[in-house]
Amino acid sequence: MNGATAMHDLAARAMAREWFYPYVLPDGRSLPSSHDGRVDAIHTTRSRMLDAWLARELAGDRGKLRALDVACHQGYFAIQLARAGLGRVDAADVRQEHIDDVDLLRQIYALDNLHTQRCDVFAMPDSASHDLVLMFGLLYHLENPVGALRKARALTRDACLIETQVVPHLSGMVDWGSYDYVRPLKGCFGIIDELDETHAPEASVTGICLAPSTEGLLWLLRAVGFSHAEVLPVPDDGYEQLRHGKRVMVAARV
Ligand SMILES: C[S@@+](CC[C@H](N)C(=O)[O-])C[C@H]1O[C@@H](n2cnc3c(N)ncnc32)[C@H](O)[C@@H]1O
């Protein structure tokens, strides 16, 4: 089979099914959407925010940098990083179906710097192996989000971007055994039930989900060892949840 025929077959495979992200093939055709484009704004807003961060913080030669996209799904952000010139991008997800999808797109887009791995976030080695770690859309699908933040810190050599749904914050003093001994509340988690959705491609694998408040997330990032953490700006015309602070993208530095 020659190269053109092989590429035609790969593109035909991709066109034959539906995708969670708004992908465009090299020949200009858009891949079919699994949601008629209803969810595209959340993806494109996050992509613009990631682009803005890359332009600001990693403006120079990116060829020696290594990045990891934890919970990559169909690889939308890993592919963005690979196209942005990072020397090596690892895309990992617990679901094999997603890894297979990223492998198909890697061939279609001819991205030799993109590598895939099926892996649960908690099984990743604590190796500070990546200059940049993305953890988008994962935290609020986990029953152990603090463990995931510890893992993110352990994997990160320089910067980690975390994007998550957040819950309203509670603040105030808490009696800690007695009204004479009080502690300030640093943040809170909301418990969300995904027990009946663990089969869904975007969902939790255990069904018990803890979503943090923004203030709690910022406090936790420093508590697990990042030196600095900040909420990134959202474009004025960005997705409503990000504009209204119901989701946040946070940049943490080692
Ligand atoms: C809402 S999707 C987010 C995908 C993508 N990062 C994004 O932001 O668009 C959640 C992803 O987390 C993955 N996931 C869930 N639990 C995981 C775990 N314990 N380890 C690794 N990936 C997990 C799912 O398979 C799914 O791809």
Image (cartoon, rainbow, N blue to C red):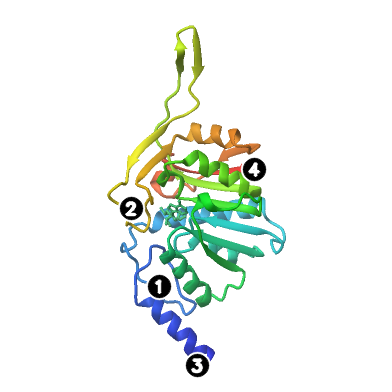
Q: Residue 201 at x, y = what percent? A: 36, 59
Q: Image quadrant for the C terminus?
A: top right
Amino acid type, label 2: Thr
The reply to whether residue 206 is in sight is yes
Q: Which of marks 3 and 4 is nearer the N terminus?
A: 3
Q: Which mark is residue 30?
A: 1
Residue on which disc 3 sits: 1
Q: What residue is rendered at 45% in x and 49% in y?
A: 138
Q: Element type at marker 3?
A: loop
Q: Residue 93 at x, y = what percent? A: 48, 59
Q: Please tell me whether mark 3 or mark 2 is closer to you in this view.
A: 2
> Residues under labels 3 and 4: Cα distance?
47 Å
Q: Which of marks 3 and 2 is nearer the N terminus?
A: 3
Q: Residue 250 at x, y = what percent? A: 54, 43
Counting labels gives 4
Residue on which disc 4 sits: 253
115 sits left or right of 192 in the view: right
Q: Is the residue under label 4 in contact with that under label 3 (CB below 8 Å)?
A: no
